[in-house]
Image (spheres, rainbow, N blue to C red):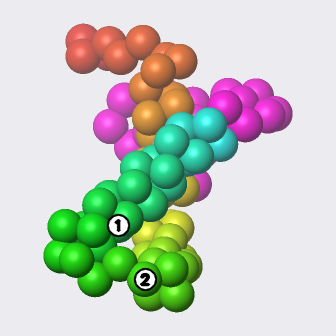
Amino acid sequence: MYNNCAVCGQDLQIEVGFYYGAMYVSYALTIAIIVSLLTALYVFDIFAIELFLITDVLVLIATLPYVFKVSRAIWIAIMIKYDPKA
């Protein structure tokens, strides 16, 4: 992760432990992915617990880097006020 934003210069390494709250955002995003997958399997009437678990693990591993970055971005967007004039 960069130390500063390339556009506005915002310090992204605010303090030690600042991004611990992003774990809660990451958890919510992961639950949304799991529920979406479960719903898709039910809608297409192909639900089996083995298929769900294998697909779930593969999807979560594939989306892990994206969820990690997006959860940190959401967390800093919640905590830091954006100033478009800066």
Name the residue carrying label 1.
37
Residue toward you, 30 or 39? 39
Dominant secondary structure, magenta: loop
Q: Name which quarter of the figure residue 59 lies in.
A: bottom left
Residue 26 position, x and y percent, is: 55, 47
The structure residue drawn at horizontal position 19% and vertical position 67%, both measured from the top left corner, is 43
Residue 13 position, x and y percent, is: 66, 36
Residue toward you, 29 or 9? 29
Give the amino acid type for the residue marked by disc 2 in the picture: Ala
Image position of 72 with respect to 10: above or below: below
| The magenta stretch spans residue 53 | no
The structure residue drawn at horizontal position 29% and vertical position 73%, both measured from the top left corner, is 41
The structure residue drawn at horizontal position 37% and vertical position 29%, both measured from the top left corner, is 8
Residue 67 position, x and y percent, is: 47, 57
* Quarter the N terminus occupies: bottom right
The residue tagged with tag 1: helix, strand or loop?
helix
Residue 48: give its label: 2
| The magenta stretch spans residue 10 | yes
The 10 Å Cα crowd at callout 1, few under 14, some 14 to 19, many 20 or more, is: some
The structure residue drawn at horizontal position 44% and vertical position 60%, both measured from the top left corner, is 34
Q: Name which quarter of the figure residue 12 lies in.
A: top right
Q: What stretch is highlighted in magenta?
A: 1-22
Extreme residue toward the left, this view: 44
